[in-house]
Amino acid sequence: MLLRVLGTAAGGGIPQWNCACPSCTGARAHPARRRRHASLAVQAADDRWYVVNATPDIGDQIEDCPPLLPSPGTRQTPVAGIILTDAELDHTLGIARLREADAFEVLATAAVRDALRTRLHLGTTLAPYAEVRWRDLPHASPIALGPEPWPEPGRPTARPAARPEAVPAATSTGKPLVEVSAIPVSGKRPRYAAAGGGQGPGAGGPHTAPGETAEPGSADPGHEGAGWSVALRITDRASGATALYAPAVATWSAALADAAAEADCLIVDGTFWDDEEPIRAGIGPRTATGMGHLPIVGPGGTAERLAALRARCLYTHLNNTNPLVDPDAAEHRRLAEWGIEVAADGMVIEL
């Protein structure tokens, strides 16, 4: 299994455009400290990759990752689709950046998929540009990541004929290398999808715009809870090696604990160092847990749990208030004593 870390920052990135805190100021003065929005690339076949979460940085993240670049002299791309862990803007705004593609997949839970299609209207917005195939991201049985030709045999498409400038996804003949499944970690909705808010056309059920295809969703436990934020379990189909990617963890559930115990590598929510950090930094009245992120240390902290695991453990999704943004911070030495790392943009992980 081959993973590429495309970004490791929480919302806004580091530096954040409207912030002059010590971390953001330091990142401007020392470019090596810059971090893009948290994202991960997963190799699904020899020439087929999926990007976990489509951030506002997705264009630059693709450009800086050689395996994701198009072939010389062609307009083919190895980026076959996006896998979403939630519906937050920081993880979904980049979907629109893929409009030049002829077709691509978006794997998401029913709650996330419906929020993007009925609140943000991404389906109808992208339909004139690209064929978007929405696939269900299951909680139970895993699904293989491609390859799959476009369009699917026997599936009618409402999308117009490809335009000369369209960019088709690369066609792979290799066998799928990995499979993925979701583990619910939070019922936290993005603000634009707050319960009881207005919804767009088709909000009462599945909505497919011209140019879209959609798989029937599984029974949805998540509209009021589990489907809004998930961790991804990524498994190598040949070796059985497993990675767990969880950039936003509100509760350490029994299901998450079981998956963590079985994993060979964990890349976990490291948004805040301790629970009082957001209040102490003056960014709001809520604690880390109140914002849907377990802290690294202190009561309910994840470091103690990770230190007890056999797996390689790394933190991602760092907020600009987190002292770990400073490579010289003493907190790095504390993590090293526990055998825990901080993921870096551009890191390559092979399992």
Image (spheres, rainbow, N blue to C red):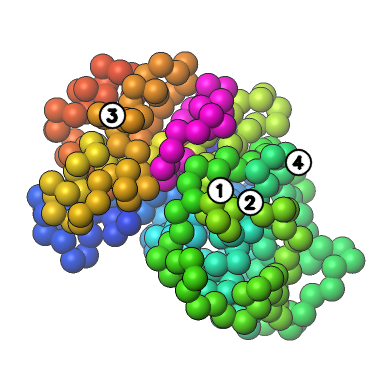
- The residue depicted at 82 percent of the width and 63 percent of the height is 152
Q: Is residue 217 left or right of residue 93?
A: right
For marks 4 and 3, give the CA distance.
Answer: 45 Å
Mark 4 vs mark 1: which is more N-terminal? 4
Alpha carbons under labels 3 and 2: distance apart: 29 Å
Q: Amino acid at mark 3?
A: Pro
Q: Residues within 10 Å of mark 2 (few under 14, many from 20)?
A: some
Looking at the image, which residue is at 58% across and 37% down?
A: 233
- Identify the amino acid type marked 4: Lys
Residue behind mark 3:
299
Residue sitting at 76 percent across and 60 percent down?
A: 216
Viewer-nearest residue: 317 or 81 = 317
> Crowdedness of circle 1 by 10 Å Cα count: few (<14), some, many (20+)?
some
Residue 351 makes an appearance in the image: no
* Residue of label 4: 175
Does residue 347 sit above or below 71 in this rendering?
above
Closer to the observer: label 2 or label 4? 2
Q: Which residue is mark 1?
A: 226
- Locate residue 170 relative to residue 23 in the image: left or right: right
The amino acid marked with disc number 1 is: Ala
Foreground disc of the pair 4, 1:
1
